Amino acid sequence: MKKRGLDLKLSLMIVIFTGVLSIILTVASMVEHSNKVDEYYGENASKLALSFANMTDGDFIRELRELVDEPEFQAIREKALETNDWTPMENLLEERGLLEEYNEETDMLKSFKKDMDVEYLYIHSIEGDISVYLMSATEGMSALGLIGANAEEFAEYTTNMHIDPTVSDMDGIWVCSAYEPIYDSNNEAVSTVGVDIDMNQVMADRNHFRNRMAIYCIIFVLMAALCGIYVIRKLVVKPIESLTDGAKDFTDEESGYCSESVLNLDIHSHDEIETLYTEMRTMQEKILDYLDNITKITAEKEKISAELNVATEIQASMLPRIFPAFPNRDEIKLFASMAPALEVGGDFYDYFFIDYYHLALVIADVSGKGVPAALFMAISKTLIKDRAQDCLDPATILSNTNNHLAEANDANLFVTVWLGILDLRNGELKYSDAGHEYPILARQNGEIELVKPINKKMPVAAIEGVQYVTNTMQLNVGDTIFLYTDGVPEATNASDELYGMERLEEFMKTHYSLDVEELLPAVRKNVDEFVGDAPQFDDLTMLALRIVSFAEEKGEKTDGE
């Protein structure tokens, strides 16, 4: 879509505003001028009508009006209209003694019309919606008894009375008409004097005035538009264009975002544009400072990221990852996995032979996440393995590890641990629980149970001097023990719902027969499907061991082979 420039928009606004203003002023001035002119001529017409009404003998006019209503007059008038001979009407007036005064009044009417320069001057009587002419300065004797063709103009009047002046088009002639009543000696209105002043020249002048005002209006609009465009272009559009060009230079991919591209314009308009320029310059300087900081921070993050990658590799290398774990030992099948929520995590697992018949299983979860938890995990894992090298009692191993870690634990970290030592000769499993999640035991027949100790103790490193307890349980051939951290049951979806132990136990009931290499990925997949697009908040660590057979007595060995 083609963009319209600011100068074009503002110019159109100026043209529209000045055009509307000019039209309003023109119409208002024409209306005011017309009203004043009409009022002036109306007053003159009313004065002329009133003057002649005062000069007229009202008693004589009343006699004329009564004569016009007589049947004899009506018959004589109809015959005169047919023959165009008005002598019989003159004879009737003379017979009634009214002819001389009629002629005098008519002469006075004509003289007044001539002297006052009026278009029409007449006397007529208004009765309801009938206008009956009695005298006319132009019609002569033929006006006597004439029924007016414009009687509808007087339909609202019920008697002879004053009528306000009006301007109207009378058969192509513009006139200003005024009417004043004639009173007899009894002060009764007997008829009306009508005066029509020629308004053709006035209307012509009015049209001329209107045309001139229209021309002046167009000239005014054009001049205002040109001046407005010039002023807007100079004071608004050009500074904004300069600001736009400066902003484009600053954001140019090749040469932008440098101190040379900062706006440096000569804008001193002392208005919002200058304020905008000042703020844009300040913004560009802050952007440069921000970019400089971002560059430094990015370099530092890249360095930290590289170090974290190394830490991730180191942590991963600390956990046994080669499966089958003990290819020369057919008595067991074992598989484990760990997926940290961050680059490095605090969960860990371990499995190792203490001697030929005793296999240690460890799963733990350090409080917190990230690098501190990972360091504490490394120390905890090393200490547990070290303490287990010459000890077959899980409680003793955890007690010694706890005292060592709690002695200098300024970070107040702790670790939940489940440590079990399995005798492969008979399936006896000795274990100690330091505040960890209960393992799930899947029997060969599909029965599922949680491995709950008699006494569950506090996590390792929380308090020095804790005496942990060793519990004993029996595993049979075909049984599977599933160890995990809280990241599995506490996995949360987008609706803040937990995966939960109920789902985990139900899943184990239907999938316990899977090989351990398939069981852990299946659990992870089921958790991921539940979580959906929600982010992973905690480490997911699992270990599964299944007894295939019991070991035979073959003498003392220490390498697990």
Image (tube, grey):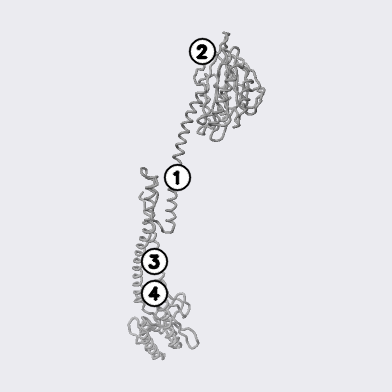
Cα gap from disc 4 to disc 3, whole angstroms: 28 Å
Whether 145 is drawn above or below 379: the answer is below
| Marking on residue 328 | 2
Cα gap from disc 3 to disc 1, whole angstroms: 54 Å
Give whichever of 34, 295 is nearer the camera: 295
Q: Earlier in the sequence, mark 2 or mark 4?
A: 4
Q: Earlier in the sequence, mark 3 or mark 2?
A: 3
Q: Identify residue for label 1.
A: 289
Q: Identify residue for label 3.
A: 22
Q: Residues within 10 Å of mark 1 (few under 14, many from 20)?
A: few
Q: Nearer the viewer, mark 1 or mark 4?
A: 1
What's under tag 4, amino acid-wise?
Answer: Ser
Query: Circle 3 — which element?
Result: helix
Q: Residues within 10 Å of mark 3 (few under 14, many from 20)?
A: some
Whether 295 is drawn above or below 467: the answer is below
Query: Circle 2 — which element?
Result: loop
Query: Circle 1 — which element?
Result: helix
Cα gap from disc 2 to disc 4, whole angstroms: 126 Å
Report if the CB atoms under discs 1 and 4 are less than 8 Å apart: no
To which quarter of the image does residue 485 belong? Answer: top right
Q: Earlier in the sequence, mark 1 or mark 4?
A: 4
Residue 429 placement, left or right of 206: right
What's under tag 3, amino acid-wise?
Answer: Ser
| Marking on residue 279 | none
What's under tag 2, amino acid-wise?
Answer: Asn
| Marking on residue 168 | 4
Whether 478 is drawn above or below 111: the answer is above
Q: Nearer the viewer, mark 2 or mark 4?
A: 2
Q: Which residue corresponds to the image point at 32% horizontal and 83% vertical from the top-left? A: 84
What's under tag 1, amino acid-wise?
Answer: Asp
Residue 399 placement, left or right of 63: right
Q: Earlier in the sequence, mark 3 or mark 1?
A: 3
